[in-house]
């Protein structure tokens, strides 16, 4: 069986994406505030999806750690404080 990952989606609150942890998928949202913080770190004029793509590995790493730590929420919201 081949699984395909859902593409990230830009919404009102940020970018929604899915991570797999322990063979289970978890819906996550990286907030617009977090994306703006990451964009400032890079010093560019990227839009939210471009910022997500530029920091995708770091964002997914944070999301996986939060899932393993048992942080609740549906979707699991990643705010700017997680990227300081």
Image (spheres, grey):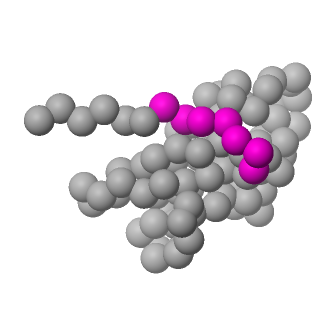
Q: Relative to residue 4, is residue 10 drawn left or right?
A: right
Q: How many marks?
A: 0
Q: Is residue 55 visible?
A: no
Which of the 4 quarters of the picture holds residue 35? top right
**At x 37% / y 35%, what residue is drawn?**
5
Residue 11 % position (x, y): 70, 41
Q: Relative to residue 57, is residue 48 drawn left or right?
A: right
**At x 75% / y 50%, what residue is drawn?**
13
**Which is nearer the eye, 17 or 38?**
17
**At x 82% / y 35%, what residue is drawn?**
39
Residue 75 % position (x, y): 56, 61
- Quadrant in which the N terminus is drawn: top left
Residue 54 % position (x, y): 65, 28
Q: Relative to residue 40, is residue 59 drawn left or right?
A: left
Q: Relative to residue 51, is residue 57 drawn left or right?
A: left
Residue 34 % position (x, y): 77, 50
- Quadrant in which the C terminus is drawn: bottom right
Residue range (magenta): 7-13
Furthest residue in direction left, as rendered: 1
**Which is nearer the eye, 12 or 40?**
12
Which of the 4 quarters of the picture holds residue 77? bottom right
Our reading of the magenta stretch's main secondary structure is: loop
Question: Where is 71 relative to 40, above or below?
Answer: below
Q: Is residue 44 visible?
A: yes
Instruction: Tell me if residue 29 is in the magenta stretch.
Output: no
């Amino acid at each position: 069986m081949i699984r395909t990952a859902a593409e990230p989606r830009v919404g009102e609150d940020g970018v929604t994406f899915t991570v797999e942890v322990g063979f289970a998928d978890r819906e996550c949202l990286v907030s617009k505030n977090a994306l703006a913080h990451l964009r400032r770190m890079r010093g560019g004029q990227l839009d939210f999806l471009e910022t997500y793509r530029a920091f995708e590995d770091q964002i997914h790493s944070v999301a996986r750690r939060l899932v393993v730590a048992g942080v609740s929420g549906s979707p699991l919201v990643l705010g700017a404080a997680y990227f300081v």
